[in-house]
Image: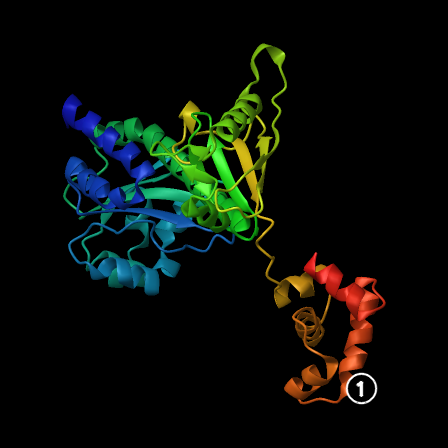
């Protein structure tokens, strides 16, 4: 039916689509040509077994077929219902699934106008969500599920299953990387994640600010972090080497150094921390030098932490008003001014203040302010 070269190109396109899901559209177009069909779709259903939007665009004569399927006809799809209940890898023909149900709204108003009267269908994955492939064709004098087409789809099913599994793992990895990045961004200190090759893999905004200033620490052209003073730079590299060194059953260990700043401001405190050997790989999957190896934390004593009302609420279980009162006190406002700005009585502010004392374990305003600023 197709040549060995054509089959190899089709398999290569499947795996390329797993890495770049935007390529599934062209890959399904290749499926349509290889099987001599009129449409092809890769669909999913969620944990409730309700069909969700088609994973990729359906390739067919009428572009509106995908829109009308997602908007209405998908819920009437008896073909999908049968495929999702079948064993993974089992191939159905249109003769089995479509022809016995032509007296339905789904067939009359969606399948027939789009010339989807026959085809081949196979469930690819299971679990909480399932994926299945459908190749559609018009009804002809002979069934679409010829021996050649059945042989071809059997050969492609293992590759499709592997590709969808890979795509899911890549999506989970990307989601985990985004969550890690968001969490690191909330930290006031400078955070640098370094790979096994010594180059940075991630910087939070605090680290970007410190390194961009070039006041004691900087990034080289090759992406490695270094210190301005030669002695400090050697010490930093030595600590990073210790943090990465796990040869001969040695336990990786880091350390802390004081990094002078040419500006004369307070030295940075730089903490070098080894990461676990099984740390999740970041970026390109499967490359040994893509694994995060070292965490560098940079403390800037000259940078006062910025208080945040949301953080105060979470930290001490304060109400919204109590956190705002605490914030104003930490900023140096008097009780009288807070009452005026909030348009409440001084007694009300003092009541809020008493609740804040109880929740933070403090007894006086000065003690409360010291706690908040620490």
Question: Does the image show residue 1?
Answer: no
Residue 27 in the figure: left or right of residue 223: left
Could you tell me which residue is drawn at 54 percent across and 23 percent down? Answer: 238
Q: How is the image coloured?
A: rainbow
| Left or right of residue 178, residue 253 in this image | right
The C terminus appears in which quarter of the rendering?
Answer: bottom right
Q: Is residue 334 left or right of residue 33?
A: right
Residue at horizontal 83 percent and vertical 62 percent from the top: 361
Q: Answer above or below: position of 150 versus 328.
A: above
Locate residue 146, reporting x and y percent.
21, 33
Q: Residue at x 19, y 43 (%)?
A: 29
Where does label 1 land, which residue?
347
Visible residue check, residue 283: yes
Is 211 above or below relative to 318? Answer: above
Q: Quadrant of the N terminus?
A: top left
Question: Residue 306 at x, y = what percent?
Answer: 59, 61
In the rendered view, does 265 fall on the left or right side of 108? right
Instruction: Estimate the x, y position of residue 366 in percent, counting from the top left.
Output: 78, 67
> Nearest the camera: 57 or 211?
211
Counting labels gives 1
| Viewer-side residue, 290 vs 168 | 290
Local crowd size for mark 1, using a 10 Å CA cut-off: few (<14), some (14–19), many (≥20): few
Going by the picture, which residue comes out furthest to the top? 248
Determine whether the residue tagged by mark 1 lies in a helix, strand or loop. helix
Q: Position of residue 143 (x, y in %)?
A: 20, 39
Camera-nearest residue between 245 and 166: 245
Residue 69 lies in quadrant: bottom left
């Amino acid at each position: 039916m197709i040549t060995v070269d054509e089959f190899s190109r089709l398999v290569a396109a499947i795996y390329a689509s797993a890495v770049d899901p935007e390529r599934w559209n062209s890959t399904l177009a290749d499926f349509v040509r290889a099987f001599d069909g009129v449409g092809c779709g890769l669909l999913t259903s969620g944990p409730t077994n309700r069909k969700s939007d088609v994973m990729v665009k359906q390739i067919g004569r009428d572009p509106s077929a995908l829109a009308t399927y997602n908007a209405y006809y998908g819920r009437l799809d008896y073909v999908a219902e049968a495929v999702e209940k079948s064993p993974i890898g089992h191939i159905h023909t249109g003769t089995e699934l479509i022809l016995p149900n032509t007296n339905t709204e789904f067939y009359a108003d969606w399948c027939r106008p789009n010339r989807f009267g026959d085809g081949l269908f196979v469930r690819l994955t299971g679990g909480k969500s399932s994926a299945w492939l459908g190749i559609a064709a018009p009804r002809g004098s002979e069934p679409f599920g010829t021996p050649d087409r059945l042989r071809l789809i059997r050969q492609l099913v293992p590759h499709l299953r592997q590709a969808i599994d890979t795509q899911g793992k890549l999506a989970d990895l990307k989601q985990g990387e985004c969550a890690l990045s968001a969490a690191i961004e909330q930290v006031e200190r400078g955070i640098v994640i370094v790979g096994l090759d010594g180059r940075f893999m991630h910087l939070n905004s605090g680290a970007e600010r410190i390194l961009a200033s070039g006041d004691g620490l900087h990034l080289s052209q090759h992406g490695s972090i270094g210190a301005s003073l030669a002695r400090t730079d050697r010490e930093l590299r030595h600590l990073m080497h210790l943090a990465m060194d796990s040869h001969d059953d040695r336990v990786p260990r880091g350390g802390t150094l004081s990094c002078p700043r040419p500006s004369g401001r307070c030295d940075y405190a730089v903490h070098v921390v080894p990461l676990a050997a099984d740390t999740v790989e970041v970026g390109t999957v499967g490359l040994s030098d893509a694994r995060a190896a070292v965490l560098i934390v940079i403390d800037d004593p000259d940078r006062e932490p910025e208080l945040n009302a949301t953080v105060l609420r979470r930290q001490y279980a304060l109400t919204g008003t109590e956190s705002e009162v605490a914030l104003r006190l930490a900023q140096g406002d008097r009780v009288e001014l807070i009452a005026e700005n909030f348009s409440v009585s001084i007694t009300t502010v003092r009541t809020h203040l008493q609740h804040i004392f109880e929740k933070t374990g403090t007894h006086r305003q000065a003690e409360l302010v010291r706690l908040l600023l620490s």
